[in-house]
Image (cartoon, coloured by chain):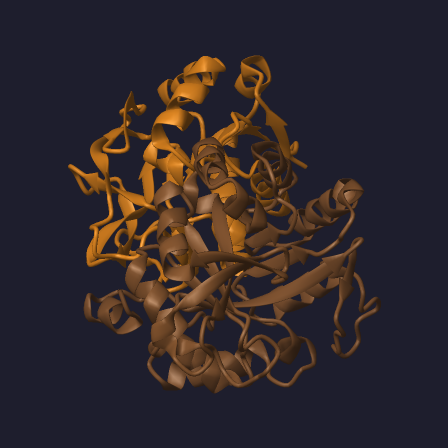
Chain colours: A brown, B orange
Amino acid sequence: MSARGAAAMGDRLAARVIPCLDVESGRVVKGVNFVGLRDAGDPVELARRYELAGADELVLLDITASSDSRGIILDVVERCAAELSIPFTIGGGVRSVDDARMLLGAGADKVSVNTAAVSDPELLDRIAAAVGSQSVVVAVDARRRDPEDPAAGWEVFTHGGRTPTGLDVVEWCAEAVRRGAGEVLLTSMDRDGTREGFDLELLRAVTAAVDVPVIASGGAGDAGHMADAVADGGASAVLAASILHFGDVTVDEVKDVMDARGIPVRRDVGAA
Amino acid sequence: MTRRLRAAVLDYDAGNVRSAKRGVEAAGVDAVITSDPVVAADADALVIPGVGHFGTCSRRLRERGLEAVVRSFIAEERPVLGICVGMQLLYAGSDESDEPGLGLLPGRVVRFPSDAVVPHMGWDVVDVARPDPLLDGIDGRRLYFAHSYYAVPDAIDHVLARCQYGGERFPCVVREGSVVGTQFHPEKSGAVGARVLANWVTMLRSEVQA
């Protein structure tokens, strides 16, 4: 259902603005340009800053290549859980029910599964059965089969966007949801890093096909793009990294623009 | 100087117990995460977190001997706080499962209509239906929800606040004597959620010391 449809039913659920932190060996990678950070590489301090700045939720993506780093990311998750009072998702390298349990047990609210779910779709059934769908996000990296023609569809890529799978994005999203994913984190590889705006055709195709919330990712260049993803793409949430990290736009400014376009947002972040 | 109160956060593989512990500690009580009925029975108050499946939560609570502790708290009018599925468990049952709930509150738990985006996930507005000190500073504020089922009460006197989603209005704060439930996650709802927990702790102090 589109945001407009929801509003017509009298719903007021806020569109979520979600900063994404890429974490490698326990440190934030990609530049972060916040004034006054004691340690620009500490994901926990940055997460806390984003909470205070009005972020509705956070995604931490562990991009550590080696598999012997579980202890490091678990420590980050535990410290985030101790510091944050907003929800956060942890993704990257979730390959088993045990991985999911461990990360949720350390204090994450959701786990995001990408490559391992494509290799073994039943993994989603098993994780959802163990922890509940509301804690399972399927992350999907999508690339247009023909850059000029959305009618040609989108292909699922895995392994951080390096490996084509042949799978159709819309079909895979629908299957992942059927198997128990409670949310879709949908990244347009074509737009990622371009700042040209989200792939709205991709968003519309996926939000029409699934009935769970879809988080739009890849291509945010300004606040208007994020409002477009919700109002025109049907997204429930927008994810952004560099434009927020570099201070090109603040969470508040994104919400100002959404608010001006009639999209419900959470403004009252302070104490009552 | 009064002694510090202690809450037992029930650990039955059904929720983010760390966040619940952090939340009630920040509100000014000591908290212990436990799956031991003896430890739980000794606390001043119980916190029942709960995410996931109603039937799984209900079964695990019973299998670990914790349901009996919750029932004794209810019978003795000692404070209990149920969060999310922890609140839903206070009702008789859910369409999600044949497992029974605790049956303290009249009503059933049902799924959102199929034309809504489900789970209901994110920050939504809480409307106070019945003024209560528990809700001081909360009316019209946004708190964090993550659920696919909601309660349909058979009576309204226990409903302190409602939310609306998928065209449905449903209870999001309930209270029956010393037992309180919230459909949202106060421990994940920033400063506004912290206010709910602080209000609960104030209630706790007056009840425990009364």
Judge left or right: residue A267 versus residue A106. Answer: left
User: Residue B186, how many percent across, how many down?
Assistant: 48, 49
Say if residue A111 shows up in the picture: yes
Judge left or right: residue A71 versus residue A261. Answer: right
Q: Quadrant of residue A262?
A: bottom left
Q: Nearer the viewer, residue A99 or B127?
A: A99
> Relative to A242, is A184 above or below?
above
Q: Nearer the viewer, residue A184 or A270?
A: A184
User: Residue A84, how many percent across, how many down?
Assistant: 63, 54
- Which residue is painted at 50% across and 37% down in the image? A123
Give the tally of numbered discs: 0
User: Residue A165, how many percent across, how many down?
Assistant: 52, 55
Q: Quadrant of residue A211?
A: bottom left
> Relative to A221, is A207 above or below?
above
- Which residue is painted at 40% across and 55% down in the image? A173
> Relative to A67, is B62 above or below?
above
- Which residue is painted at 47% across and 51% down in the image? B196
- Which residue is painted at 63% across and 77% down in the image? A244
User: Residue B20, how many percent across, how many down?
Assistant: 56, 40
Q: Residue furthest right?
A: A38
> Relative to A54, is A159 above or below?
above
Say if residue B210 shows up in the picture: no
